[in-house]
Amino acid sequence: MISLSSTIKEQKHHAEREPAYQQIGTRYIDDSDCGNVYEISYVVKGEVTAKKLNEYLNVVRKEVDREELGTNIVKVSYYRNRVDALAWKETDMREYTFLNVE
């Protein structure tokens, strides 16, 4: 029988390891390399690895509608705090994705 105490500890440990993403804002930018780009800012809490960022980017890629955006390029910028995300500060945690073109 698993005790409630050990279950709570396991859930807490799991929650600390898994990143939590909170979308903060969106905007269109004129990127010097890519032209018209739709940018999404997220605050990420928890352990972040390249694998986790790529998994989350795949979720974003599936949910974004290229026709609705008017562009097939999405820049996803990740921040550690809300203040930086709202200010759209430069961040090393960012990725570009190209939506499927049919």
Image (cartoon, grey):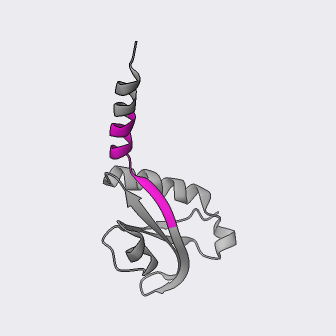
Q: Residue at horizontal 35%, vertical 50%? A: 51
Measuring from the top left, give residue 18's x and y in whole percent: 38, 46
Measuring from the top left, give residue 31's x and y in whole percent: 45, 84
The answer to if 52 sits in the magenta stretch is no
Q: Nearer the viewer, residue 56 or 36?
A: 56
Q: Which of 37 and 7 is in front in this view?
A: 7
Q: Is residue 77 above or below residue 21?
A: below
In this image, 48 relative to 22: left or right? left
In this image, 14 relative to 69: left or right? left
Q: Residue at horizontal 39%, vertical 43%? A: 15
Measuring from the top left, give residue 50's x and y in whole percent: 32, 54
Residue range (magenta): 11-23
On the image, which quarter does residue 26 sit in? bottom right
Q: Residue at horizontal 51%, vertical 84%? A: 29
User: Which residue ends up furthest to the front in the rendered image?
Assistant: 5
Which quadrant would the C terminus be assigned to in this image? bottom right
User: Which residue ends up furthest to the right in the rendered image?
Assistant: 68
Which quadrant would the N terminus be assigned to in this image? top left
Q: Is residue 3 above or below residue 16?
A: above
In this image, 65 relative to 16: left or right? right
